[in-house]
Image (cartoon, rainbow, N blue to C red):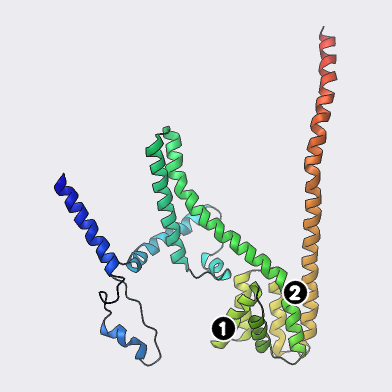
Amino acid sequence: MTGRLLVVSALSLWAGATLLLSRVRWFARPPLTERLRPYAPGGLAPARRAGLLSVESFRDAVGPLAQLVGERVSRLLGVGEDLEVRLARVHSPLDATAFRVRQLGWALAGFGAGALVVLAFRPPAAVGVVFVLGAPQLAFLVLEQQLAAASRAWQRRVFLELPVVAEQLAMLLSAGYSLTSGLNRVARRGRGSCARDLERVSRRIRQGVSDTDALQEWAAVAQVPALDRLVPVLALNHETSDLGRLLAEEARSIRRDVHRELVELAERRGEQVWIPVTVATLVPGVLFLAVPFITALQLFAA
């Protein structure tokens, strides 16, 4: 027994030391080709080399499986929107593979926690199955729900900020700014969600994409109906000379949509106020009516 324990301890120590030393620069020395890569023609960035048992190699090995399983589970749970689009919408630093790997890690941690609870408290078999199988699903759904909530909140902020952004662009274009310079100014001076999205639009324009294509990419990622109506107006930049007036009219239209939603929300909350009042009124009334009714039934039965 002692010999087996020593063997297991030696293997664990070897694996841990390999993972630790793979992160040390002097131990995991990159080859000559990667050291010369930054000085090659074209300014290529240095590629990160993953060790045999490093965290990067583990992510590369588990990533495709985690992405496949995560997509299948998301489809079963009714999530139809692409994960890459949602991550790009909220400007997440993670890509789809990294997010699915994180979900897989949380699910494994939930499975381990559920198994420990079952081993510690020894509940009935049905309760134990619920703990063991429900904990990883709950951990998976927590991350999925967090991303979905962040995506909806980002869309809401973009919708609320669009009237102001459209009015700013209308004033800049009327003052003689071009569409590209106006987008850059709003992105540089703004602090909201639209400003961050316009930073990406400006970056795409600097990469050689046309302003119309960059704005259409923004609309495809944001998926806000008001933005879908605003982008075709901005696309008229090369066809009309009074784009500022058109943008001002579109800003007023979007503001009316925002006002309409706020009125609907206020009326809905006003209706919800009457629900507890109605319940509080009906329950005592039913009790007061039930007492004489039951008494009358007893008299007729006697």
**Measuring 30% from the left and 76% from the top, which residue is drawn there?**
25
Report the quarter where the N terminus lies: top left
Q: Amino acid at mark 1?
A: Arg
Mark sitting earlier along the chain (2/1): 2
Give the percent coordinates (x, y) of residue 112: 39, 48
Report the quarter where the C terminus lies: top right
Q: Secondary structure at mark 1?
A: helix
Residue occupied by mark 2: 163
Q: Would residue 226 be visible to someone looking at this image?
A: no
Q: Nearer the viewer, residue 213 or 254?
A: 254
In the image, residue 297 sits, relative to residue 51, either above or below, namely above
**Measuring 40% from the left and 39% from the top, which residue is drawn there?**
118
* Residue 180: quarter of image: bottom right
Q: Nearer the viewer, residue 225 or 153?
A: 153
Q: Secondary structure at mark 2?
A: helix
User: Badge 2: how crowded within 10 Å, few (<14), some, or many (20+)?
Assistant: many
In the image, residue 272 sits, relative to residue 90, either above or below, namely above
Give the percent coordinates (x, y) of residue 10: 19, 56
Q: CA distance from mark 2 to mark 1?
A: 23 Å
Q: Amino acid at mark 2?
A: Pro
* Residue found at the far left of this picture: 3
Residue occupied by mark 1: 203
**Measuring 71% from the left and 85% from the top, which residue is drawn there?**
236
In the shown orientation, is residue 147 left or right of residue 118?
A: right
Give the percent coordinates (x, y) of residue 132: 42, 43
**Measuring 78% from the left and 61% from the top, which residue is drawn there?**
262
Q: Would residue 277 be visible to someone looking at this image?
A: yes
* Residue 197: quarter of image: bottom right
